[in-house]
Image (tube, grey):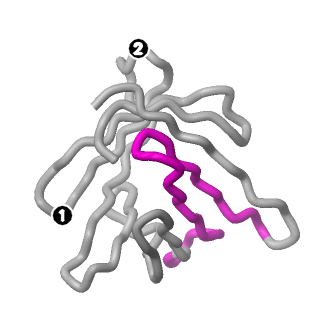
């Protein structure tokens, strides 16, 4: 999952991210305002825990926890203060889909991520 990614879906025509290794258990995901990668708009850490679980945090606050998953799909349920869960689904090594649960009664939102470079 490391590398330079471009995504689309939901309310976004396109968005750009870089995911890089921080240490043996953590990936940092940085989102940028545009494809020049000059201005960071958001940052998250994706951490694999000792028990095999996975958390996603923003600014030190855990937003999602993976309670179940496999090789090609990871399901995250919301932590405190987060409205909905999400699923990451691998299509190929260079393409993933993220499905974000909507609020009660709303349809989920799908984002497609494509790897540009490692």
What's the residue at 84%, 63% (across, down)? 106
111 left or right of 52?
Answer: right
Residue annotated with mark 1: 25
Badge 2 marks a residue whose secondary structure is: loop
Sooner in the amino-acid sequence: mark 2 or mark 1: 1
Question: Which quarter of the figure has residue 12?
Answer: top right
Is 7 positioned to the left or the right of 9 in the image? left
Identity of the residue furthest to the bottom in this view: 51
Magenta part of the chain? 79-103
Q: Name the one closer to the observer, 116 or 29.
A: 116
* Residue 90 position within the rendered picture, expressed as x and y whole percent measured from the top left: 49, 54
The structure residue drawn at horizontal position 22% and vertical position 58%, both measured from the top left corner, is: 26
How far from the left and from the top, in percent, is residue 46? 33, 59
| The one of 114 and 29 positioned closer to us in this rendering | 114
Q: Is residue 91 above or below residue 51?
A: above
Q: Residues within 10 Å of mark 1 (few under 14, many from 20)?
A: few
Up/down of 75 relative to 100, above or below: below
What secondary structure is found at the residue carrying circle 1? loop
Q: Is residue 76 left or right of residue 109?
A: left
At x 26%, y 52%, the residue is 27
Compared to 29, does 41 lie above or below?
Answer: above
Figure quadrant of residue 50 = bottom left
Q: Which disc number belongs to residue 36?
A: 2
């Amino acid at each position: 999952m490391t590398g330079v990614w471009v995504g689309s879906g939901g309310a976004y025509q396109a968005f750009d991210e870089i995911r890089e290794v921080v240490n043996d258990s953590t990936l940092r995901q940085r989102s940028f305002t545009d494809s020049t990668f000059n201005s960071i708009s958001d940052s998250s850490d994706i951490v694999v825990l000792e028990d095999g679980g996975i958390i996603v945090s923003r600014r030190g606050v855990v937003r999602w926890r993976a309670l179940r998953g496999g090789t090609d799909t990871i399901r995250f349920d919301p932590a405190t203060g987060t409205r909905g869960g999400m699923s990451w689904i691998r299509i190929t090594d260079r393409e993933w889909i993220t499905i974000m649960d909507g609020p009660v009664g709303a349809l989920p939102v799908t984002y497609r991520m494509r790897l540009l470079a490692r």
